[in-house]
Amino acid sequence: MEPSENAPPSCCADNIKEKTSTESAPRWRKFLLAGAILISWFVIYKQLLPFSHFFTYSVLDFEKGSHLGGSIQFFVYDTPKVLMLLTLVVYGVGVIRSFFTPERTRKILAEKRESVGNVLAAHLGIVTPFCSCSAVPLFIGFVTAGVPLGVTFSFLIAAPMVNEIALVLLYGLLGWKVAVLYLVTGLLVAIVAGWIIGRLGLENHIEDWVLEIRTNADDVPGDTLSWNDRFMHGWQAVKDIVGKVWIYVVAGIAVGAVIHGYVPEGFMASIMGKDAWWSVPTAVFIGIPMYSNAAGIVPVIHALLEKGAALGTVLAFMMSVIALSLPEMIILRKVLKPRLIGVFIGVVGSGILLVGYLFNLVI
Amino acid sequence: MEIKICGPGCSKCTEAERLVSKTVNETGFQATVTKVEDFAEIAKLGVFSTPAVVIDGQIKCVGKVPTRKEVLEWLK
């Protein structure tokens, strides 16, 4: 027994030594490496479309315009494209997020008035890192440190709705205009819904035990991260997020590929088109209890749009799927009384509904 | 030494508990590792982003899984 007990500490000591020696590697070499990786990223990215055509129609020898060929070309093009975009953006966002912590965000928000606070909270919701199961502790930490209820909600609505994965996929599959539209309307829904919830004065619908807790917004741990730590942070985010969602992305693209190849042009126009007034509420209604992460839902949406579904209907569906979900409501029930949860779903749902109708009208 | 791992039970929280327990066991350090899953308890410890590690009432790390190196430093 004794030797084995003694062995691990010495091996850990070796680990630590190894780590510190790699950290002190010359800085210029790291920047050179980063530059080289970035350049090869762009070169490869540019080759994806010609490669998918070459692979499908020359190597596999499918006829151009055939159903199966179309599906395969879509899949071969979209999968690497989306995964590459995802890796790059998740890395960048990971580095940016190393500057923000929930503690610092809380400190900023605790000092703000309501309206300004709602706007800030929605934006901070995008860049503040927190794991989805932290929503409840975060809610408690915010509310008990004096962040207004409505401002807290703006934060909690924006955080899942406007996420980097959704934006990357929308940009990659549908272009920058749709991505910007999504970003702006997502923020607006979070700001306005939070503001309305704040105006309604529902503080007494928070569970009583939460209100008895007092926390202090001034407890902010110091920031001691070096640039090296921040880059590692980005890399860690890539391993965590891309490692987890790639399978959903591939599955989503596969579904999208089938729709792309087999569903006739304009098929969706009749059920998800502009003229069907009931399509937006139906989409939101179906979307609320559903839960999928953005990674799985966007490729499907891409294919639906291609076949004539209206943009507003599709965006409303996506927002309700990723921003409101049944599991989240069940967790929130621990700190919120049913009526406040009802108001939350109602206000956010109506906001999404409005966005859907607005886009269908304008575009 | 009393080590508390706060987390409602997502994969990251489980990972944090596993890592801390493993490190404590390997070093043969005298410490009890407990997992705190109740939101009220977590809030009372002053933690509001999980996973978090609290040692003898002092918050050591919040919002992330600590590295092995960090855990070893706390145990010193």
Image (spheres, helix red, strand yellow):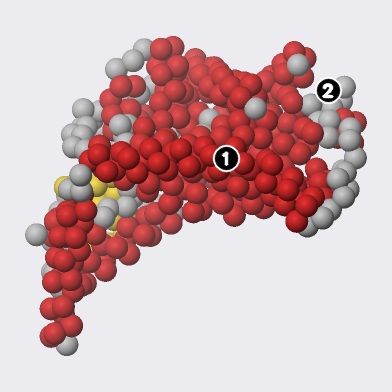
Q: Position of residue A307 (x, y in %)?
A: 83, 35
Q: Quadrant of residue B35?
A: bottom left
Q: Residue at x 69, y 49 (%)?
A: A76
* Count of numbered labels shown in the rendering: 2
**Residue that label 1 marks:** A45
Classify A197 as above or below A89. Answer: above
- Nearer to me, A178 or A349: A178
* Badge nearest the viewer, 2 or 1: 1
Whether residue A313 can be seen here: yes
Q: Residue at x 56, y 51 (%)?
A: A246
Q: Amino acid at mark 1?
A: Tyr
Q: Residues within 10 Å of mark 1 (few under 14, many from 20)?
A: some
Q: Residues within 10 Å of mark 2 (few under 14, many from 20)?
A: many
N-term-proximal mark, 2 vs 1: 1
Whether residue A290 can be seen here: no
Classify A244 as above or below A162. Answer: below
Q: Amino acid at mark 2?
A: Lys
Label pair 2/1, CB-CB below 8 angstroms: no
Q: Residue at x 56, y 19 (%)?
A: A184
Classify A251 as above or below A32. Answer: below
Is the same chain shared between marks 2 and 1? yes
Q: Residue at x 56, y 24 (%)?
A: A183
Q: Position of residue A303 (x, y in %)?
A: 76, 39
For disc 2, the chain is: A
Look at the numbered disc 1 and give the secondary structure of its residue: helix
Q: Quadrant of residue B19?
A: bottom left
**Residue that label 2 marks:** A274
* Residue located farthest toward the bottom when viewing the structure as drawn: A1
